[in-house]
Image (cartoon, grey):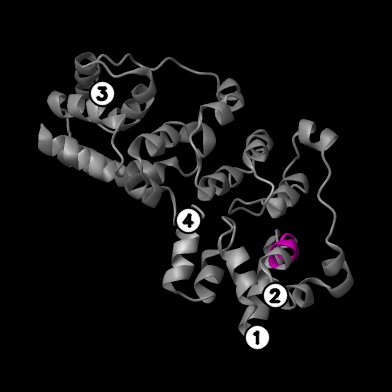
Amino acid sequence: MRADITSGRAVGFLLDLIDSTGADRVRARVGLPRPAPEDLREARRRLPSGLPALPSSVLLWMLQEDDPELNAVVWRLLTDRDTALRRAVLNGVPFGPGPLPTVEVDPVLRDNYEPPPVPERVARLGLVPALRESTTMAAAREATSMVYRREHWQTVAAADRENSLPGYVRWALAVRPDCPPSLRAQFGAHRKFDFRVRQAGITTGPAEYAVGHGPALDALKVLSLGHVMFPRRIAEAEDALRPLVRDHLGDHEEAWAVLAQLLGTFHGTTEELIVTAGAIA
């Protein structure tokens, strides 16, 4: 069974989780060549065209690199509703855990774009009053577009603790990938609320995404580029998948051949794919 071009990178990502000797035997069995070294800058330049639809949390992991070049890639992936993230990128706001005061803005972005204007209502009332009077989703999205720095999130959390913010504001903030998990938890848990968060593509981290996101081919395509897109966090995904690969596939060539054959049409998660391939073999 020869792995096609589409699935080759995805299978290769999983093969890198076993020992090199076993991986070489499997590559020969499924007709998968060793990956050629690639230039990091060129790989990043090609990113948007080669990716499936990304859960919004993946964009956050990319922003957490605090890398101007990666931020320019994220910019091309943002939608019209991502006004706050656009503000953050153009203002050099850091997303990583360190104390970095500001991130250099990519020259192409700096020379061709300006941060969106401050909404009139926020300029007139101030952030918290504007949030409190946001009784429609449109008003909430407009006001929350000014929440993009760490101190803004702290102000929002304090205001909500003092007196709960309107539901539309909580909704608009909770589905943002950069919403602090502690604030999302502070907003409370409800089945509809949790559904909206999942629908927005929010995950707890690369480990959850690696194991539980489907279809498996899409997730593995993204993870196979993790060293390019979010190198600081790709190890979390690898650590979550490694025991599954070891227990269900190992260096069993037939199991890998089954996995390569299933991958293109399998609709389940990566965990389900690995377990299924091992069971069939």
The image's mark for residue 162 is 1
Give the x, y percent position of residue 112.
Answer: 83, 34
The image's mark for residue 20 is 3
**Which one is earlier in the sequence, the residue at label 2 or at label 1?**
2
Crowd rating for badge 2 (residues with CA inside 10 Å; few <14, some 14–19, many 20+): few
The answer for how far apart the CA atoms under marks 2 and 4 are is 22 Å
Crowd rating for badge 4 (residues with CA inside 10 Å; few <14, some 14–19, many 20+): few
Magenta stretch secondary structure, dominant: helix
Give the x, y percent position of residue 191.
Answer: 41, 71
The answer for how far apart the CA atoms under marks 1 and 3 are is 56 Å
The region drawn magenta spans 140-145
Residue at position x 18%, y 28% in the image = 258
Q: Is residue 19 visible?
A: no
Residue at position x 45%, y 58% in the image = 198
**Which one is earlier in the sequence, the residue at label 1 or at label 4?**
1
Q: 99 or 208, which lies in front?
A: 208
Residue beneath disc 2: 135
Give the x, y percent position of residue 274.
Answer: 22, 39
Q: Amino acid at mark 4?
A: Gln
Residue beneath disc 4: 199
The answer for how far apart the CA atoms under marks 2 and 3 are is 58 Å
Label 1, secondary structure: give it: helix
**In contact (CB < 8 Å): disc 2 and disc 3:** no
**Which one is earlier in the sequence, the residue at label 1 or at label 3?**
3
**In which quadrant of the rendered view does residue 172 lie?**
bottom right
**In contact (CB < 8 Å): disc 3 and disc 4:** no
